[in-house]
Image (spheres, helix red, strand yellow):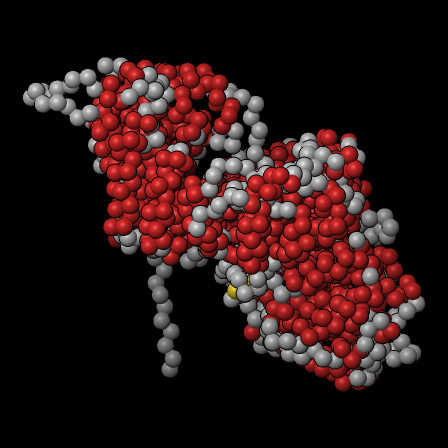
Amino acid sequence: MAGFCLFTLTESLLALLAYRTGAGSEENIHISGREPDGIACVLSGFSESSETRALISSLPEVHEDTVTTESATQRFLVIMNRYQEQPHLLDPHLEWMLNMILDLIRSENSPPALVHLSFKFLYIICKVRGYKIFMQLFPHEVADVHPVLDLLSRQDPTDSETWETRYMLLLWLSMTCLIPFDLSRLDGYLESGGGIAAEPTMECILAIAKSYLLVSDSPRDAASVLVSKFMTRPDVKQKHLGDFLDWNLSTISQTSDQSMRDIMVLDGALQSLAKLFKHGKRDDLLQYAPAILQCLEQKRLSESSQARLRKLGVKLIQRLGLTFLKPRLAAWRYQRGSRSLAANLTMSQSATAAEAVTPDMDIQEQEEDYDIPEEVETVIEHLLVGLKDKETIVRWSAAKGIGRVTGRLPKELADEVVGSLLDCFSFQETDNAWHGGCLALAELGRRGLLMPSRLTDVVPLIIKSLTYEEKRGACSVGSNVRDAACYVCWSFARAYEPNELSLYVTQIASALLITAVFDRSVNCRRAASAAFQENVGRQGTFPHGIDILTAADYYAVGNLNNCYLNISVIRELATKALHNLTPQAPDYMATTVLPQLLPMAVGLDLHNRHGAIMACAEITHALYKLGLQTNRPVVDMISSDYILLFRGFGGELMRPAMCCLIEKLSLSKMPFKNDQVITDWQGLIDDTLKSLHLYSSGAKDGIMHAAISALSALCEEYYKTQTGQADSQMQDVLVSQYIEGLESPKTLTRCGAALALGCLPRFMIHGKVKQIFEGLQQMCSISQKEGSFIEARRDAIRAIAQVCVTAGVCAHGSPDSILCSENIAKVYGTLLESMNDYTTDSRGDVGAWVREAAMTSLMDVTMLVAAGAPEILSPDLATRMMCCLAQQAAEKIDRYRAHAGNIFLRLLHSTEPAVPHIPHREALLNIFPVLNWNAPSQAFQYITQLLGLPQYQYHTLLGLTVSVGGMTESTVHFSSLSLFDYLRGIQDDQVILAQFGDTLLSIFRDNIRNDRVTVPFLKMLNQMLANSCFEIFTTQENHQFCVDLLALCKELKKSRDVSKLLACIAVFCGLIQFQGEVRKKVLSQLLMMLCHSFPVIRKTTASHMYEMLLTYDDVINPEVLDDVMTLLSDTNCDLATVRPHRNQLCDWLGVARPQVVAKVTIGLY
């Protein structure tokens, strides 16, 4: 089995290499995710019984109000819909629910609105439980006939609000038609009001049934049920059956499917006939069957555009076929003796086989004498056509019809039907025919109508169906065929004895396993797993069945990655799966699979070419790794001539595929050194890196990284001399070319050049390290000043770290070949400078990409230095690095805060190697536990403790500034909470608080022109002043902290930035709490802001001053307080009138009036 399984598995994977996605693809595939399992919650009983009683009992009270009516109905819907998957749980409760509702309906005091609402509740129950079960509970005594008929006759068939009432009344009337008395006995001598005899009950019911067969809503379905019950009564069929069928055929003949009205009429007529022929007796209907079949043939329903009409046509035709044939079970059918799963697992195969029943000879002789009407051939022909319909519901109905009709045929004719059915499995047929054929085979097998002698023809077709796929434009179809083929395998497991299927076990098991593991559709994988499980249990002959089911059960196959990579975008995963399979049969892969792939790899089909090239790459690499273990060169297993056949650089698909091929062949050490193909490959890589801007944004990263990986592998294998040195010519060319690329006007070309320099092997950068560093550092510094090429700066920072790691470290080495004491300061300087990259554009804080790369690169370089030459890492560099990381760990963006915090702790806790010169190492170890840096509630309470360490205070407070003064609610809340907790702890220590104030002023002074810091700083400062964090300074007049702070704020007053000015006003109002001359200066600034040119600034200043004077009552003389407050609240914000009011306020507050500075014009003489 192993050889066959590997062969078929490989064939399946080769088919998947050409997999296409598109608008018509059958499944949206989430490579890294798990498809939903769809596991329903299993209920144990009807737990809402008491609530349902209360709802039904409340109907008389709620029916008058629309809101309460809708609320009660919606709640009842919610309760009932819970039992859609397990409706049998309602059975013990259906009777009391029905009786409660019928009591309301029968009550003479019930208004029409309550009656309609009651019938709506009945319909909800009926919909969940199914009308066939529920309608049997309706009372159907003689006394019920006329009340139901009268109530139904009073309904308006055109009222769209009450259709549930008519639907349920028609079902109820259907049940009353089952009374065993002649309906004429119910009439007596009835007279209408004018003495004229009333219409007989039979005529009345017939008229109602006909009228509701022609409506356009759901009561039409209930009317067809009424017809099936009413027309099959002995008294009715004698008088009206023929006339009703004539009326029905006339209706069908006179309508078309071109208008919605005619479609509804046709639907009702066909439904009524289908149900009538289902429930009626054969002897009564046989005489009419030929005429109905002829009418259907003339109507040509199979060509209708309406799927429902085609389905009803197929259903009616199969019922006609069953009418033509005598109702008998085929004595020749195959019958499995034991259907018990437990018995099958315990009994031996021989004992089970003995139970199989074979037809007797006398029964076979009787079959030969059975005469088959000619119409049956027409019926079967229509059913076979229905199997190829474009809609699944039609094909499924036709498949069931094939099974039912074949069960009444003699053995020879049934075998002919099977032969005709197998014609559906032609590759000239569409996927619809294959799907319908699979459904029909499953039905025949399930019914025992597919004899074991036919398995030789059927099993190969089912194996093909399990891998069926048809390309259609930019996508593929066929998942429904594969799913149906799994259903066939499932039905065969239940239908046949193990000895009948023993010859086909290997084929079926292998095909099901491959489908369960490698099919891209989750439905097919699960269907195959279920079929495999059924065969393991029922047949007991599947090899390693339990072990396979344990690894690939129904839920395990739901995960695509798990299927392709553990249990074993689709083409990529399929190629990796081929890589994993190569060690199992290397010769087969080399001599059979690769020759199949190579023509595909140079073909015209883009998708085939893409998948084949990647598969060749993976298989070749796997053969090389296998050869390392067996000392067998890869060229002994495959011909290198094949590899030279690849052509076409292509676009988004072919670029990464060719780069993958180059990488894998280089890793496989193919003997192409100094060959022209190496030049071509290098040209492809260089062209790819230069043309990245031509590709879509979603594909650029994948193409770039594929090219970089290919370049690294190519250099490692083909540009190294026998002495281990670089090919000097190629070294000069590549390094110069990529350094020149760092100056390209295209961002992506710079990215590619930077990453290319970073991926070069050690021998390629030996003697060029200084040149490479200078190129990368210059590009970073110049572009950072210009605020451009952000992605290129990010990749250049990454490349610097990669070059350092590749070159290695040595304290006294050459700066042109290694990281040493001479160049480490420049490297760290570039990385630390990049930690302050806060470039923003339309995408937001894009500088964060550079900062993140700089943090990662700092960690890599620091760990390298600490391990190899810790003496060259100076205390100053270590301090700057840790302070910058602390700043980033205190900032507002969760992702980058977490990244910085994790690196900070990794460097701190690293012992092998230990990072030297970390300031306050012991204190830091005591502060930081293991924590979730992404959560502001956890991170800031520890970060703020760094404020107590002098060397970290400045940078930590700078980071906290943008968090406390930010906009994200959770970040602002937890950062400010932690900061104020720290400040409360130092309130009584004037020295420490003064030191904190100096640091605060330093940050303000250093960033006064930096809007990114200034606005959040002012917001943070306002919160500090509002929370009296500097209360100890207010006891001293003209405290230097306040004086300096006021001076800095005065510089911002000239800004034209409204947000900055508003924040500055709030700070001025907070500074009023300080005593001395500084208070007068603050008031003067505020009063000048009252006359600002921006109305919003004038209005905000007046409002804030009003609140300030209410808070600090010692600012103004109480005698004029009311006048000042009145003036501030009534001040017109118009600039022309506000200045006199401002001057009046100056007089009341004891502040000198501001003087208008005259503009001086300087003339040139």
* Residue nearest the viewer, comparing 990 with 721: 721
* Residue nearest the viewer, comparing 440 with 721: 440
Q: Residue shown at 73%/30% (left/top)?
A: 343
Q: Residue shown at 48%/18% (left/top)?
A: 92
Q: Quadrant of residue 65?
A: top left
Q: Quadrant of residue 570?
A: bottom right
Q: Position of residue 1111 (x, y in %)?
A: 43, 32
* Residue nearest the viewer, comparing 124 with 252: 252
Residue found farthest to the left: 194
Task: Please give the count of numbered marks on the rendered protein.
Answer: 0
* Residue nearest the viewer, comparing 99 with 951: 99
Looking at the image, residue 550 sits to the left or right of residue 222; the answer is right
Q: Is residue 664 visible?
A: no
Q: Residue shown at 29%/31% (left/top)?
A: 238
Give the answer, above or below, for where 570 lies relative to 949: below
Q: Position of residue 118 (x, y in %)?
A: 32, 23
Q: Position of residue 752 (x, y in %)?
A: 66, 72
Q: Position of residue 769 (x, y in %)?
A: 79, 73
Q: Quadrant of the C terminus?
A: bottom left
Looking at the image, residue 199 sits to the left or right of residue 516; the answer is left
Looking at the image, residue 660 sits to the left or right of residue 1048; the answer is right
Q: Is residue 259 visible?
A: yes
Q: Residue shown at 52%/57% (left/top)?
A: 433
